[in-house]
Image (tube, rainbow, N blue to C red):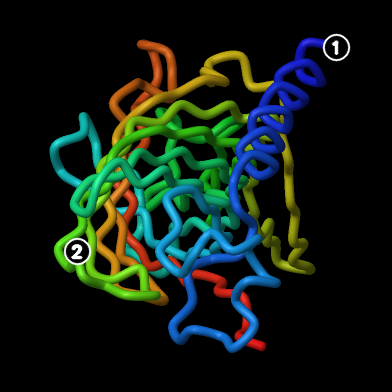
Amino acid sequence: MKIISIILFFILAFSIQKLSAQTVLLKNTVPKNFKYLDDDKGPNRRHYSYSYFSIGGIVSSDYYPTPTLQTLGKSYKVSSGSTGKIQTNRYVGLLWDFEIAYKSFALRNPDSTNTIEFSPEISIARYNFIKINNATGIQFNFKPNRGNQLGTYLSIMGYFDYSFYSRFISKSMAKSDKFSKAEKNSFKKISYIRPFSYGLTVKFGKHMWDVFAKYRLSDLFKDEHIELPRLTIGIEFLMHQDDE
């Protein structure tokens, strides 16, 4: 019931921001029937929302007690979400964001310190998570006379998220003189994983896309376990409604 309550809270927050915002994103060109689309609020609306799809790589670093991850292609994040904005003036806006994300951390060197039920035969090991994320922050517009486009902007947000799915996956190949056998093990309800985390997100965008850096400030594991990398970088593709 606790998990269901948390998920329902995130869904409620997402629904409120979608229902309270104008549903049509600022357009790249002014459509002919603009009054019909937005109740005659005009092309530069103060309050709107838009959806996005993102993909990114998780960056490993020697600053951790022991670097555990592979390079960018091996550890990754994919997500989809929605951003709402209230424009306070030509240069600054207030943001809120709802996102659901899948993150996969590939261990560089599986060993007894970071691998559940470690054996020398294990060749691949991953921590996989599905998270719901909520964030708030501000956006600075570098192109205040942007017309009907989002323009060029920088956004800074603080976030917190909840992991309602977490798994540790390992694959091994047991060999003998007569046969070899592939094995895959999956572990859930891992006691040393913290379900909640928080951090900062920075985005730099132009019109239809943005690049982002997301840094987790909190620890993902409890003290007795090695920490996973905190930095994710990637690109988001913004979903504009087609002009009519």
Residue of label 1: 1
Q: Which of the 4 quarters of the picture holds residue 214?
A: top left
- Residue located 33% across and 31% down the image: 158
Instruction: Say if residue 121 shows up in the picture.
Output: no
Q: In this view, does 169 lie to the left or right of 106?
A: right
Dot 1: few (<14), some (14–19), or many (≥20) neighbours within 10 Å? Answer: few
Q: What residue type is labelled 1?
A: Met
Q: Is residue 213 left or right of residue 186?
A: left
Dot 2: few (<14), some (14–19), or many (≥20) neighbours within 10 Å? Answer: some
Viewer-nearest residue: 141 or 81: 141
- Residue 147, position as x, y percentages in the image: 32, 75
Please tell me whether residue 158 is drawn above or below residue 120 in the rendered image: above
On the rendered image, what quadrant is the C terminus found in? bottom right
Mark 2–mark 1 distance (CA, rounded to whole Å): 47 Å
Asked which secondary structure carries label 1, the reply is loop
Viewer-nearest residue: 27 or 210: 27
Q: In this view, does 121 lie to the left or right of 106?
A: right
- Residue 144: assigned label: 2
Viewer-nearest residue: 240 or 216: 240
- Residue 177, position as x, y percentages in the image: 71, 66
Asked which secondary structure carries label 2, the reply is loop
